[in-house]
């Protein structure tokens, strides 16, 4: 009896450790991770799947025998009745086992379970819009589908082939028509899983959320057709969506044999599944980033400035689109600046092409040129390219959208754009001679080139021009030593280099020939006070063309003394314009500045609202409801 107090004390000390169930305040991040963590974010199944395992006493077995556990789960699902909670668990657990080395058969099983959970037959069960499981099931479906068809050689490369595929519980007969792997008049090849690709260098990563594995694909020409396939940049990559559609559910058509069809979808935003309109998942940003990385347009920037004819030598697409020409959309032509390339529009393209209203109304074209050449010569090439595109795509002149073109020019590109919307008369020729052009003796080829380059008229199909950091009054960086050094380094195309010899060298013509022997570079043209800058500055934009200026300025000092590092505010500011936006603080390369992009978007949407009818405006969100 004497020992009982000690026993009571021992028991009391044990009970003092606390009750077996308790709560404790934790950080929000810890609790949120516990409640929302899943196989895609933590590598471990979510609480939803653990609950289903715990209900059946399978949690412990799962840790050492996942394949056997999944076999039991599949047996229960196959025996029925439909159990969507267990179906979701099968989706996530199959994916988890595949990640841990179970093999692609389990990725494929995860795809089928996810489809059955989301769209399967049986009693219609409306899934709560706030339930996280449908979105997670779609995410697992998308990732698992790409992994189920990955090649063994290279990760993230997806191979689309028909034929039998092994499942943990039988065989899946996959049907696929390779003729569906087309984009306009081009064949889609080299598919990459966007979910496995990181993106560096672009500020925003856009993805349309839905069903289907987002891929990006390279293209190969099938043959030149009327849809403008030859107009598309050859190294473009196309965002597409891969769908595996079981036929019709998990019920086998023969013992152990299921059937499904692979579908490759592009240029559509939704798909019909069991009478439901379901959004598709796309990944356009990774496609754009990979196209730029593979095409490497930056390699042409300095050589293109110095080379004079590098664009032709390298067979670079001078004027090209990011997609086949579409008659119902207005072209927006982006013209880059000096020692630059079309790649410098990447941020703007990424943002604007992923804006629903902009995408519905516009198609983007890019113009590339050798930026050291005389500006009038580069403008001649732009004028030719635009005119040829219009004649090619609308020879009958019936496409109104094509004749509402918008030009966006950065720096020197803005000067090229202005030369598309002015009437010069003989203003540029007077910088060379007071003699009438027709009276100066020269070879026919030289006369034709000078006539085309120096006597410009507005293009009737250009309706809006946006100047970005454009040196209308010249660039203060284009003077002195910089000019003298570049004059020695820049080469010219053959047709320009022989101008001085094609003009008869006697009397007044001899003086003119000597002037053409010293051709100005684009930097000479952009020197403050140069004859070219004065001449172009004296020419107004023709009536009926909208004009807009976006002017970057560094610092917060007086605007009149503002500069962007290359161009002064006083040089970029012109009157009259329909709008002017000063972006500060911003340097000269302001194409990727969010405020610059938003201003371009505003201008484009206002232009589209004037062009399109009411139905199109409502579809694009241009009209208030």
Image (cartoon, helix red, strand yellow):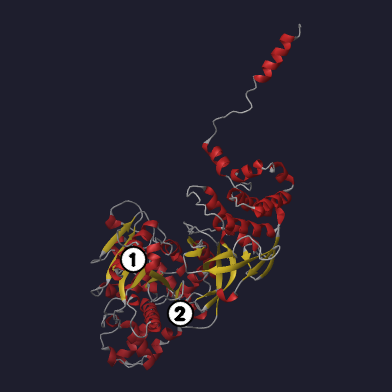
Residue 518 makes an appearance in the image: no
Image mark for residue 604: 1
How far across and how far down the image is residue 563, in percent? 34, 58
Q: Residue furthest top?
A: 2
* Callout 1 secondary element: helix
How far across and how far down the image is residue 81, in percent? 61, 52
How far across and how far down the image is residue 423, in percent? 26, 79
Horizontal arrangement in the rendering, residue 554 relative to residue 261 (left or right) = left
Which residue does the numbered mark 2 point to in the structure image? 228
* Callout 2 secondary element: loop
Residue 321 makes an appearance in the image: yes
Q: Is residue 132 above or below residue 428?
A: above
Q: Quadrant of the N terminus?
A: top right
**Separation of marks 2 and 1 at Cα, in angstroms:** 23 Å
Quarter of the rendering containing residue 534: bottom left
Horizontal arrangement in the rendering, residue 506 relative to residue 145 (left or right) = left
- Residue lying at 27% horizontally and 82% vertically, measured from the top left: 430
Q: Is residue 624 above or below residue 1?
A: below
Task: Assess disc 2: are there few (<14), some (14-19) or many (≥20) residues with their C-alpha within 10 Å of its C-alpha.
Answer: some
- Residue lying at 55% horizontally and 61% vertically, measured from the top left: 212
Q: Quadrant of the C terminus?
A: bottom left
Taking depth in this image into account, of 111 and 611 the one nearest to the observer is 111
How far across and how far down the image is residue 200, in percent? 53, 58
Task: Assess disc 1: are there few (<14), some (14-19) or many (≥20) residues with their C-alpha within 10 Å of its C-alpha.
Answer: many
Horizontal arrangement in the rendering, residue 145 relative to residue 565 (left or right) = right
């Amino acid at each position: 009896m004497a020992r009982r107090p000690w026993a009571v004390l021992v028991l009391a000390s044990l009970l003092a450790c606390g009750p077996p169930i308790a709560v404790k305040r934790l950080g929000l991040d810890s609790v949120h991770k516990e409640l929302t963590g899943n196989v895609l974010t933590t590598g471990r199944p979510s609480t939803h799947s653990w609950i289903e395992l715990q209900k059946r006493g399978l949690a412990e077995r799962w840790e050492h025998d996942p394949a056997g556990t999944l076999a039991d789960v599949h047996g229960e699902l196959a025996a029925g009745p439909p159990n969507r909670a267990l179906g979701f668990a099968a989706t996530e657990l199959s994916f988890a086992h595949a990640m841990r080395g179970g093999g692609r058969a389990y990725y494929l099983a995860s795809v089928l379970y996810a489809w059955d959970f989301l769209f399967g037959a049986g009693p219609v069960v409306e899934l709560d819009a706030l339930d996280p499981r449908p979105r997670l099931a779609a995410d697992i479906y998308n990732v698992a589908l790409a992994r189920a068809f990955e090649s063994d050689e290279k990760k993230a490369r997806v191979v689309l082939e028909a034929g039998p595929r092994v499942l943990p519980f039988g065989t899946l007969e996959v049907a696929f028509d390779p003729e569906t792997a087309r984009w306009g008049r081009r064949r889609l090849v080299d598919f990459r899983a966007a979910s496995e690709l990181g993106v560096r260098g672009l500020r925003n990563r856009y993805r349309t959320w839905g069903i289907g594995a987002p891929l990006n694909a390279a293209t190969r020409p099938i043959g030149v057709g009327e849809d403008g396939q030859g107009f598309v940049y050859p190294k473009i990559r196309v965002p597409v969506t891969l769908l595996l559609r079981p036929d019709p559910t998990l019920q086998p058509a023969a013992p152990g044999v299921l059937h499904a069809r692979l579908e490759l979808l592009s240029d559509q935003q939704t798909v019909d599944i069991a009478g439901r309109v379901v959004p598709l998942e796309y990944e356009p940003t990774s496609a754009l980033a990979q196209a730029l990385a593979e095409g490497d347009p930056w390699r042409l920037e300095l050589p293109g400035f110095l080379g004079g004819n590098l664009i032709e030598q390298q067979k670079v697409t001078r004027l090209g689109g990011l997609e086949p020409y579409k008659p119902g959309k207005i072209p927006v032509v982006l013209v880059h600046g000096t020692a630059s390339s079309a790649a410098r529009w990447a941020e703007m393209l990424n943002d604007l092409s992923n804006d629903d209203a902009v995408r519905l109304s516009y198609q983007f074209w890019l113009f590339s040129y050798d930026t050291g050449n005389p500006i009038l010569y580069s403008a001649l090439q732009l004028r030719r390219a635009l005119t040829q595109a219009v004649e090619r795509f609308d020879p009958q002149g019936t496409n109104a959208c094509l004749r509402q073109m918008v030009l966006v020019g950065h720096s020197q590109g803005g000067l090229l754009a202005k030369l598309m919307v002015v009437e010069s008369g003989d203003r540029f020729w007077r910088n060379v001679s007071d003699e009438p052009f027709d009276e100066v003796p020269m070879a026919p080829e030289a006369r034709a080139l000078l006539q085309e380059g120096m006597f410009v008229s507005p293009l009737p199909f250009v309706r809006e021009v946006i100047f970005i950091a454009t040196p209308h009054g010249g660039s203060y960086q284009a003077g002195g030593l910089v000019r003298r050094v570049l004059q020695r380094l820049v080469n010219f195309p053959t047709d320009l280099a022989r101008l001085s010899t094609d003009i008869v060298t006697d009397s007044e013509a001899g003086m003119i020939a000597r002037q053409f022997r010293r051709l100005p570079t684009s930097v000479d043209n952009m020197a403050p006070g140069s004859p070219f800058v004065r001449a172009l500055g004296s020419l107004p934009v023709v009536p009926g063309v909208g004009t807009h200026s976006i002017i970057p300025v560094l610092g917060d000092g007086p605007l009149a003394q503002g500069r962007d590092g290359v161009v002064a505010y006083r040089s970029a500011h012109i009157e009259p314009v329909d709008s002017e936006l000063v972006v500060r603080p911003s340097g000269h390369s302001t194409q990727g500045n969010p405020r610059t992009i938003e201003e371009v978007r505003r201008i484009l949407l206002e232009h589209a609202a004037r062009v399109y009818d009411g139905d199109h405006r409502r579809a694009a969100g241009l009209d208030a409801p």
